[in-house]
Image (cartoon, rainbow, N blue to C red):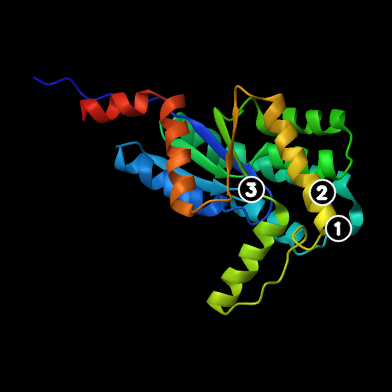
Amino acid sequence: MAEEQAEPSARFLTFEGGEGVGKSTQVKRLIAHLNSQGISAIRTREPGGTPKAEAIRSFILQGKSESWGAGAEAVLFAAARHDHVNELIAPTLNSGKWVVSDRFHDSTRAYQGLTGGVDETLIGRLEELALVGHVPDLTIVLDMAPDVAFARVAQRAREEGIPAVGDRFEKEDLDWHKRLRDGFLKIAGDNPDRCVVISADQSEEEIEAAVWKVVCQRFPEIEQNRQSA
């Protein structure tokens, strides 16, 4: 009688980076890769992922919190993240499924902290409350010069015939986005065991291949699971 195939341990992966670097596309592609290897995985996003968190997302990205300042926005993001972790991320991981999120706590550190000027101590305390110990096993930071990223977004909008209207953060000036990029690179440099930087200034297929290579190297159980299938 053949042994029952063991499901690889549930993992929590996140994608980070500035506006327009292609995180959402790569999250979808990674989920497809994982599923093709017999690994159950879900994709989610931040802010959002649950009804309450999505409501906070809408409030922030519509610019309704902008006048409150970066500190208040950090608190709102933490509230959304707390619900996201408790209602979706933790239960999914506990069920044995992998979770891949388009943004997580590093975005608050980069946007409101390193770029927005919110005190690092406050950011850290908000993280403690919101994460409840759920730090990602791997974070992929997609890196691209902001002017190149925005040019691609504008080109895509023209091709699809949709208006390129910026949200709360997309409308910030180029200098702000350059500082944001530096913030993400600093986070990656400070957390080399968790974060891997991949250039987003290449084709979607090339980025996809680079991401998959990193994921397979980091989690050898993927290959083991494929061989035993």
Circle 3: element type: loop
Q: Nearer the viewer, residue 38 or 140?
A: 140
Q: Nearer the viewer, residue 116 or 127?
A: 116
Figure check: 219 above or below 114? above
Q: Earlier in the sequence, mark 1 or mark 2?
A: 1
Q: Spatial distance from mark 1 to mark 2, Cα to Cα?
A: 8 Å
Q: Amino acid at mark 2?
A: Glu
Instruction: Give the left or right position of residue 227, taking residue 149 as reference.
Output: left
Circle 1: element type: helix
Residue at position x 61%, y 52% in the image: 21
Q: Spatial distance from mark 2 to mark 3, Cα to Cα?
A: 13 Å
Query: Residue 63, image x and y in percent?
Result: 80, 62
Figure check: 160 above or below 22? below
Marks 1 and 2 in Cβ contact (< 8 Å): yes
Instruction: Give the left or right position of residue 74, taking residue 82 as reference.
Output: right
Q: Amino acid at mark 1?
A: Glu
Figure check: 108 above or below 221? below
Query: Residue 91, image x and y in percent?
Result: 50, 35
Query: Residue 45, image x and y in percent?
Result: 58, 49
Residue designated by label 1:
66
Q: Nearer the viewer, residue 198 or 48?
A: 198
Residue designated by label 2:
73
Instruction: Give the left or right position of residue 178, taking residue 94 as reference.
Output: right
Residue designated by label 3:
46
Residue at position x 65%, y 57% in the image: 149
Figure check: 212 above or below 69? above
